[in-house]
Amino acid sequence: MTPPTEAASVLLTRGPGSPEVFAVRRAERLRAFGGFLAFPGGKTAPEDRALTPDDPRRATAARELFEETTVLVARRPDGSFPAGPELSALHRDLLAERVTFTAVLGRLGATIHAGDFAPAGSFVTPPFTPVRFDSSFYVAHLPPGQHAEVVPGELDEGRWATAADLLECWRRGECLVSPPTLLILQAVRGRPIDEVPTRIAPHAAYHASGAIPPIFYAPHVQLAPLFTDGLPPATHTNAYLVGAGPAYLIDPGASDPDEQRRLFDLIDVQQALGRRLAAVVLTHHHPDHVGAAAAAARQYGVPVWAHRLTARALEGKVAIAHFIEDGDRLDLGPCPDGGGPWHLEALWTPGHASGHLAFWEPRYRFVFAGDLVSMLSSVVIAPPDGDLALYLDSLRRLRGLPSRLLLPGHGSPSTRPAAVLDEALAHRAKREEQLLEALQAGPRKVPELAVELYRGLPANLMRFAEMQVVAGLYKLRQEGRAEEVADGPEPAWRLRAV
């Protein structure tokens, strides 16, 4: 597992005792929390280690704050802060890469002071995504004569707001807030931002304890990444606890008892807060999505719900008490924004699995995609239960939804649902084009097609490549464009003459 990248973020306040903080919206194209409100920050650079060797992330905080907001928290020898046209000119030069941050400080005769950056705790991204950060947070005050503003690029906007204002924006579904930012805002709601270091300490300790951290993308929409025995490169499957009460646990995939215990600890905390678990809900029957289904049902005395084809595949393994059909609604209780009833709509989306379901949440415009899309790799289509033509139809169905956030079974959620689904469709179209081109040479067998189309793939993954080739050939056969021909014990495939 790749170790997390060191990073730092800054809670910039208007001054001592201020309840306002400067929040920024990250550009949607960014891999980490693209489209989410967060605090200015980024990953540690080599020059940061030279600037503040005792705490390199403090220099990261100062540099990223200056790059992203034009605010420079660094002092001249007399204790004053730079301001004015010279600072603005140096900021432009920095963004144009005409100077380094170290050079900016040198020209201004300024240095970073530890006392201007109050440590406010650290958080490490859970290991369910390949992009992970070990982020330190600091509280700093806006220097006299300076103004915070965002230059479009990695950020789309910046705003001064209280924690309560930002949380209300999030509750109403008007903005997305990154989970670490949300945790900090909840801890300091109604209080001066200076109190973050003390108020966040219990949460940071809980986060470091090994428990599943509280990862919310909307009120009562909680992700629980669980270690599962899935296909590489995935090591975790995302379970989701959704609803104010009743609440539903979607895809608890952990088969390991210790990992199940971590999940139950999370559910216990939420039930103590009044969120009543009504059922375990499955998107499909694959082991990395159902590993804890029976155990969770026993633990909380609730039924397991799934599509009837999923129930058939799990017969003798997991008892399905209720069939979910296309178009069924799952009641989520009162909507957190006060707008009345709240629900999930079930979408039958076969292709990856015959009984696959996705779930559409129309208020916040979230789509729970199960294994229709992975943010880590392409999705395996394994005939006969997997059907590539149906899979493509299912992708197009999701593409037709006005989604704002795609919540996958593997990897990080995305604020670019349309782009992610378009990329998945384009990838399959490219693979089909390659398959047709390979068949132009005459009859070919599946193993040789897999080697040609998936050149460079490790040998232990080649069997999955062969499944994809077979899925593509079956689709071409359904369309009358390819056919099998006898060729010894293993058939070959060729283009069908039209």
Image (cartoon, rainbow, N blue to C red):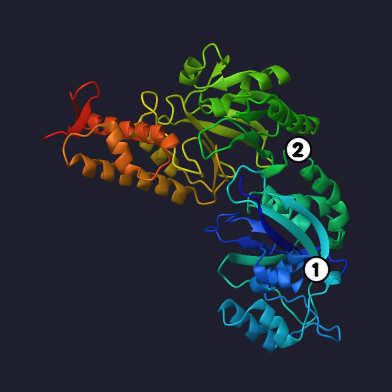
| Residue 41 placement: quadrant | bottom right
The quarter in which the N terminus is drawn is top right
Of 348 and 437, the residue lying toward us: 437
Compared across the picture, whether 23 is left or right of 441 comes to: right
The quarter in which the C terminus is drawn is top left
| Residue 165 placement: quadrant | bottom right
Q: Which element type, helix, strand or loop, lies under badge 2?
A: loop
Q: Residue at 73% of width from left, 86% of height from top?
A: 108
Residue type highlighted by circle 2: Ala
State the separation of the CA atoms marked 2 and 1: 30 Å
Of 436 and 356, the residue lying toward us: 436
Percent across and percent down for residue 280 are 62, 24
Q: Residue at 57% of width from left, 16% of height from top?
A: 318
Percent across and percent down for residue 131 are 59, 51
Question: Does residue 65 appear in the picture of this structure?
Answer: no
Q: Name the residue that disc number 2 marks.
A: 211
Give residue 244's mark.
Answer: none
Mark 2 or 1: the one toward you: 2
Residue type highlighted by circle 1: Ala
Tag count: 2
Compared across the picture, whether 184 is left or right of 330 comes to: right
Q: Earlier in the sequence, mark 2 or mark 1?
A: 1
Q: Name the residue that disc number 1 marks.
A: 140
